Amino acid sequence: MNENVPPSSVKEIEIIGVPLDLGQQRRGVDMGPSALRAAGLAAKLGTLGYHVSDRGNMPVAVAETMHRGDDRARFLKEIAYSAERTAECVQQALARRATPIVLGGDHSVAAGTVAGIANFFRAQGQTIGLIWIDAHSDINTPETSPSGNVHGMPLAALLGMGPTALTELLGWSPKVLPQHAVVVGIRDVDEAERQNIRRAGITVYTMRDIDELGLRAVMEKAIDIAATGTAGFHVSMDMDWVDPKEAPGVGTPVPGGATYREAHLAMEILADHGGLLSLELVEVNPILDERNRTAELAVQLICSAFGKKIF
C-alpha cells in the first residue's frame, strides 16, 4: 500500500532558486539551491505524484561587486530588489496554480517569498498564515540588530517592523498579521528580539516548549494559529532548526535542535493538515556541510511536507 500522495488536489510544483547570500557574512549559502537540486529534489517530488517544474535561479547581486551600505542593514538595497523579483516569480507560480518551493540562500529571501504569496491572496480578499521554523526568531530591525545582517530581520519586516525598503515591498504592510504568525523551534534569541516579539504580538514556541508539550502538540497549535481564518499557510524553514549533529551545513548552528525524527514528524503533520500554500527552505551551506548531508536531509524533509509517508 502506497500512501505517498500529494496533500491536496494541486499537483503542480514550481522550484525557484534564490541564491542570495547578502543577508549574512559567511560565504557559501549561495550554493544552497544547487546542493538541494543535486540531492534529487525534483525527482523525489516526482515520485510522490507531482509534476515538477524548475524555474532556475533568480539573478542576485554579488557581494564583492557592491557597496554594503549602512552597517545597520548591510546590502539592504540589493536585498530589497531581489525580494521584489522573488515576489513576482512566486506570484506567477501561484497564478499557474502551482505550489512554489523557494530554495535559498540566506533567510532574507523570505521577505520576497512571503510578500509574493501574501500579495497574491490579498488580491482575492484573503490573508495568509505563516509558520516560521528556525533556531532564531529573525525579528531584529536595523535599530536592534547587533550584527547588521539582514537575514536576522525578515520576520520583523513581514510583520511591518523595520526599514521601509522591506516592510513596504509591493506597496503595503504588514504582509502577515501577528495573530496568524507563529515561530517554532527557537533557541537563540537576542534580548532586543525578545522585546520585538512582545511588541509584534506573535506566538513563539521554543525548543523548551517542544520538550515540555511534545512536538505534535506544538505543531497542531502552530497550524491552528496559521490556518484559522486564512487561505492557508506558508512554511519558512531554516535548516539550523535541526540539531547540528544532523544538519552540520548551516551558517549559524545552535546545539539542542530538532532530532531527525522530530524534523520529519513536523513536516508530516503539516502534510496531514493539507493547508500548505508554499514552502521555502534556506541556509544550507555546502562549504560547511559533510558530503551534502544537510542538503539531502533538507530534500527528505521537503518530501515529507509534500506527503511522503513511511507506509
Image: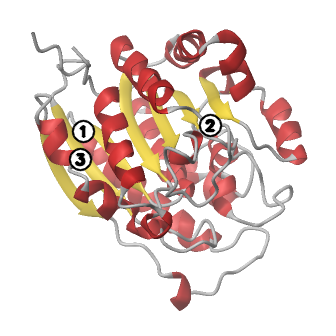
Q: Is residue 50 above or below residue 226?
A: below
Is residue 203 in sight in this rendering? no
Q: Secondary structure at mark 3?
A: helix
Query: What residue type is disc 1 on?
Result: Ala
Looking at the rendered structure, the secondary structure element under dot 2 is loop
Quadrant in which the C terminus appears: top left
Label 1 – label 2 distance at C-alpha? 36 Å
Label 3, on which residue? 41
The span from disc 1 to disc 3 (Cα, nearest Å) is 23 Å
- Please state which of the two labelled residues, at mark 1 or mark 2, is closer to the viewer: 2
201 and 301: which one is in front?
A: 301
Of labels 1 and 3, earlier in sequence is 3
- Residue 144 in the image: state x and y as whole percent: 86, 55
Q: Which mark is drawn over residue 115?
A: none
Q: Position of residue 139 (x, y in %)?
A: 73, 45
Q: Closer to the N terminus: mark 3 or mark 2?
A: 3
Mark 3 against mark 2, which lies toward the viewer?
A: 2
Q: Which residue is mark 2?
A: 257
Q: Give the residue at the far bottom of this rendering.
A: 65
Instruction: Using the image as rendered, state which of residue 122 and residue 160 is in the foreground.
Output: 160
- Residue 105: x and y, percent? 46, 61
The label number, if any, that marks residue 95 in the structure image: 1
Is residue 133 toward the left or the right of residue 8 in the image?
right
